[in-house]
């Protein structure tokens, strides 16, 4: 069971998919995920999670916070064209415990999501067979009026394909074709549908919206022990573990002065002692290291001397402030930037942070998400949940009994 909480008010009921809409009326409707469904996945059965601009999953250990992010990240990977096997290295472990096989010995799991945008509300539901053969068992794409736009099913277990049908209108009504059983059919439709009829254009718009809403995901897990090492300047694109933090700061200081100033302000708000700013030193071997300028200390404090909490705080602030131009994320190059948004997935968003740092970081996420270019979905403990409940613009979703 989930319980959704907002800042300083009773929990609001999760909106149905047809009620969901753009996060801010009047602006460009960028495709974005509004709901994550874990119908049967690991510890989840029938779980429906609302997704807002800043969403924090809270709950006791074992409540399924991390597995919810894993399902979201897997859907994003499928939308980007990644094969099923690379996204679920342990498919049997994704089957709910105690799930009995059917008469043919098959067991599996089911996940899905809802995306809103210019095409309205679009729902994607995916069934995956984990045993005896790992493959997609079925997929359904529907619109906000409940019309089925795409459906796939296994017809011949001996063949490594699914039977796909998509709505095209016209005389035929539907188009049928075999598709690979280890890929997301929705992501393949833009390569298959010509868009010549109204029906084809409807299917194409829905599929492209779902793919665009899912694919621009940056899963972030800063690793302090790796962030302390000097690094080559490199291309300045922040990796998922943030181990090249110094190289990115070297780039932002020179090329993104406004963002660098915002990051320095975040450092002053969340790091101990008087902080003047952030700098980068080039070492004799050509590598660079980041420095926190504190008080009157000559040369400042190298970041390798900071505690884990301060390093994670700075890395997450950098992720929220830089955006897709600096993060190592696969943006859809064929789509105008005004129609794209980036979703940061952060497991353990408040890990190692004190209450002040968690509050500052959550408030920063809420401010950044206000323009709908960046969204945040994270898991938190008690410290982060407390910060989320008092932060306007953030939503805490409690998982548990």
Image: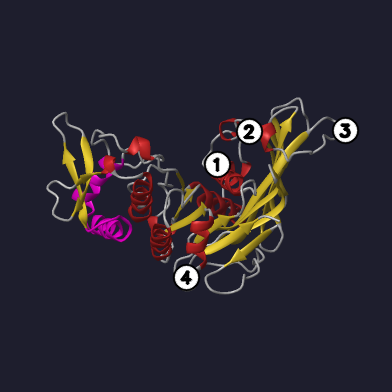
Q: Give the range drawn in magenta.
A: 245-274
Q: Is residue 269 magenta?
A: yes
User: For the residue carrying disc 2, how many other residues have a C-alpha within 10 Å: few (<14), some (14-19), or many (20+)?
Assistant: many
Question: Which sits earlier in the primary sequence, circle 2 or circle 1?
Answer: 2
Q: Which of marks 1 and 3 is in front?
A: 3
Disc 1 to disc 4, C-alpha distance: 42 Å
Question: Which sits earlier in the primary sequence, circle 3 or circle 2?
Answer: 3
Name the foreground residue: 140 vs 353.
353
Q: In which quarter of the image is residue 330?
A: top left
Disc 3 to disc 2, C-alpha distance: 23 Å
Q: Does the magenta stretch include residue 354?
A: no
Name the foreground residue: 213 vs 57.
57
Picture residue at 69% right of the left edge, 54% below the top: 47
Q: Which structural element holds mark 2?
A: loop
- Overall secondary structure of the magenta stretch? helix
Answer whether labels 2 and 4 touch (C-beta < 8 Å): no
Image position of 267 (left or right of 114): left
As drawn, the residue found furthest toward the right would be 103
Picture residue at 14% right of the left edge, 50% below the top: 297
Q: Mark 2 points at which residue?
A: 182
Question: Which sits earlier in the primary sequence, circle 4 or circle 3?
Answer: 3
Disc 2 to disc 1, C-alpha distance: 16 Å
Q: Mark 4 points at which residue?
A: 392
Disc 4 to disc 3, C-alpha distance: 51 Å
Q: Name the residue under label 1.
A: 191
């Amino acid at each position: 069971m989930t319980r959704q909480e907002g800042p300083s008010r009773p929990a609001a009921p999760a909106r149905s998919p047809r009620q969901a809409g753009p996060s801010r009326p009047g602006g460009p409707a960028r495709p974005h995920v509004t709901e994550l469904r874990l119908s049967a996945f690991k510890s989840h059965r029938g779980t429906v999670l609302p997704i807002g601009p800043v969403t924090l999953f809270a709950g006791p250990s074992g409540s399924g916070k991390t597995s919810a992010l894993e399902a979201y990240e897997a859907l994003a990977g499928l939308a980007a064209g990644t094969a099923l096997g690379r996204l679920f290295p342990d498919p049997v472990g994704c089957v709910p415990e105690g799930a009995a096989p059917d008469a043919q010995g098959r067991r599996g799991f089911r996940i899905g999501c809802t995306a809103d945008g210019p095409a309205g509300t679009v729902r994607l539901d995916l069934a995956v067979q984990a045993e005896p053969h790992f493959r997609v068992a079925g997929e359904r794409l529907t619109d906000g009026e409940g019309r089925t736009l795409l459906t796939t099913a296994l017809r011949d277990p001996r063949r490594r394909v699914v039977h796909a049908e998509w709505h095209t209108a016209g005389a035929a009504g539907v188009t049928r074709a075999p598709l690979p059983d280890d890929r997301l059919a929705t992501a393949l439709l833009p390569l298959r549908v010509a868009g010549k009829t109204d029906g084809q254009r409807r299917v194409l718009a829905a599929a492209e919206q779902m793919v665009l809403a899912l694919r621009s995901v940056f899963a972030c897990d800063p690793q302090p022990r790796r962030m302390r090492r000097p690094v080559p300047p490199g291309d300045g694109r922040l990796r998922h573990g943030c181990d090249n933090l110094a190289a990115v700061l070297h780039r932002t200081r020179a090329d993104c002065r406004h963002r660098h100033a915002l990051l320095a302000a975040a450092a002053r708000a969340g790091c101990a002692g008087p902080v003047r700013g952030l700098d980068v030193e080039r070492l004799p071997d050509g590598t660079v290291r980041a420095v926190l300028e504190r008080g009157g200390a000559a040369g400042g404090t190298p970041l390798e001397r900071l505690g884990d909490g301060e390093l994670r705080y700075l890395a997450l602030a950098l992720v929220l402030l830089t955006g897709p131009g600096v993060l190592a994320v696969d943006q859809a190059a064929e789509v105008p930037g005004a129609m794209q948004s980036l979703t940061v997935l952060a497991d353990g968003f408040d890990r190692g942070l004190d209450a002040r740092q968690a509050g500052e970081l959550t408030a920063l996420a809420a401010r950044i998400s206000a323009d709908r270019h960046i969204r945040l979905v994270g898991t938190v403990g008690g410290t982060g949940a407390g910060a989320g409940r008092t932060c306007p613009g953030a939503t805490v979703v409690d998982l548990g009994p």
